[in-house]
Image (spheres, rainbow, N blue to C red):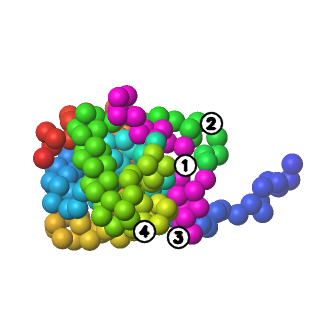
Amino acid sequence: MSQNPAWRTYKYAGKKKKKRNVADEETTKRLIAALEKESIKYETYFKLIIATGMRRGECCGLKWKDVDFSEKSCRNVVKVTGEDILVKEPKTAAGDRYVYFSLEMASLLKEYRSFCQGELELHEGRSLTPEDYIFRRHGADLPMTPSTFTWRFKLILKKHNLALDLNVHSLRHPYVKPTTKKYLFFLVPMIQLS
């Protein structure tokens, strides 16, 4: 062979991925303490991501029927994408999964459910149903969008002088990588972290 047949191959010139900042133990403790000073809706949403490793859109797509308090789990089968509220089934069977949460998270979810029931009775004159989204828009049978929570997360970080380079997705990492030594503190119940 007189020349390399791959000589015309070009190196991919796509965007380089930015290194994402992941909260360390101290930052996470401060964040959890900060969440406890926010409304129960935002406290529940962000702690659910921390406790289960769910994605933003997966949390937004949860309905009350997906939560099993006796098993301390929720069935995670839909996600919400974009501002158009596209709720869709997972692409593969692996996407249809159960995630488990602690007794403390179950208690917070029950408290939040009571709050939602009160809000619905006050503003819409009806009871909460299993078909209601856990994180729903006021006056609509639609889930809140992930961008709403992203925006709120940045406000919470700023208000409590936390690292502004954190993002909602970074909250998943301690759960997704639980065997990594630096993340083992997450195995301690969330109540003890505050």
Alpha-carbon distance for marks 4 and 1? 22 Å
The tag earlier along the polypeptide, 3 or 1, is: 1
Number of marks in the rendered image: 4
Which amino acid is tagged 2? Ala
Q: Tell me the residue at 38%/53% (across/down).
A: 127
Q: Which mark is residue 83?
A: 3
The tag earlier along the polypeptide, 4 or 3, is: 3
Which amino acid is tagged 1? Val
The tag earlier along the polypeptide, 2 or 3, is: 3
The residue beneath circle 1 is: 78
Of circles 4 and 1, which is in front?
A: 4
The residue beneath circle 2 is: 93
* Quadrant of the image occupied by residue 161: bottom left
Please tell me how crowded label 2 is: few (under 14), some (14-19), or many (20+) other residues with Cα within 10 Å.
Answer: few
Say if mark 4 contacts mark 2, CB within 8 Å. no
Please tell me how crowded label 3 is: few (under 14), some (14-19), or many (20+) other residues with Cα within 10 Å.
Answer: few
Question: SS class of the residue under badge 3?
Answer: loop
Q: Which mark is residue 139?
A: 4
Of circles 1 and 2, which is in front?
A: 1
Residue 135 point in image, percent of width and height:
39, 57
Which amino acid is tagged 3? Glu
